[in-house]
Image (cartoon, rainbow, N blue to C red):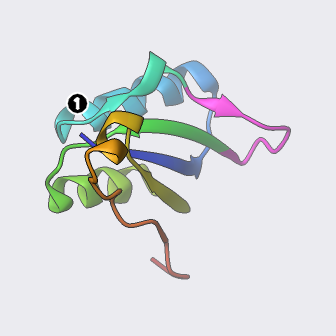
Amino acid sequence: MPFHWVRIPSSPPPARRTEVQAICDRHGGEMAWKQIFYTDDDAQAYVLIRTPDDEAKQQAILDELRAFDWIGLVHADDKQAKKRPPKSGKRSEGS
């Protein structure tokens, strides 16, 4: 399974963590360490998500999270096996 490092809109941390986990569960994904990470900017947060191989399911997670942008990643063993990470991307203005 690939990973996405995702920047998302924030809300109170425990509530947002629960919401993000539910979104991941609905689409076959999983939050790394079941955690969201924060900077000093209260308007956004970061989450590492293990996503399904299916691109449509990956996009469904990103869409429902209202992700600002994301970086596609693969595990070191997958990289060694010559697997490619999923596409990185950014939400276009107005979507």
At horizontal 85% and vertical 38% (from top left) the residue drawn is 40
Asked if residue 25 is among those painted magenta in the image, a careful observer would answer: no
Q: Looking at the rendering, in which quadrant would you find the C terminus?
A: bottom left
The residue at which mark 1 appears reads as 25
Q: Is residue 79 above or below residue 94?
A: above
Determine whether, in the image, residue 77 is placed left or right of residue 14. left
Q: Position of residue 67 (x, y in %)?
A: 48, 57
**Quarter of the rendering containing residue 50:** top left
5 or 25: nearer the eye? 5
The local secondary structure at tag 1 comes to helix
Q: Is residue 30 above or below residue 14?
A: below
**Quarter of the rendering containing residue 49:** top left
The span picked out in magenta is 36-44
74 or 8: nearer the eye? 74
Q: Is residue 65 above or below residue 91?
A: above
At horizontal 30% and vertical 41% (from top left) the residue drawn is 78
92 or 14: nearer the eye? 92
Q: Residues within 10 Å of mark 1 (few under 14, many from 20)?
A: few
Q: Looking at numbered disc 1 in the image, what kind of residue is underneath it? A: Asp
> How would you classify the magenta stretch by its main secondary structure?
loop
Question: Can residue 78 be seen in the rendering of this structure?
Answer: yes
Q: Position of residue 39 (x, y in %)?
A: 79, 37
Q: Residue most toward the bottom?
A: 93
Q: Position of residue 13 (x, y in %)?
A: 62, 25
Q: Residue most toward the right?
A: 40
**Quarter of the rendering containing residue 84:** bottom left
Asked if residue 41 is among those painted magenta in the image, a careful observer would answer: yes
32 or 86: nearer the eye? 86
Q: Position of residue 41 (x, y in %)?
A: 81, 45
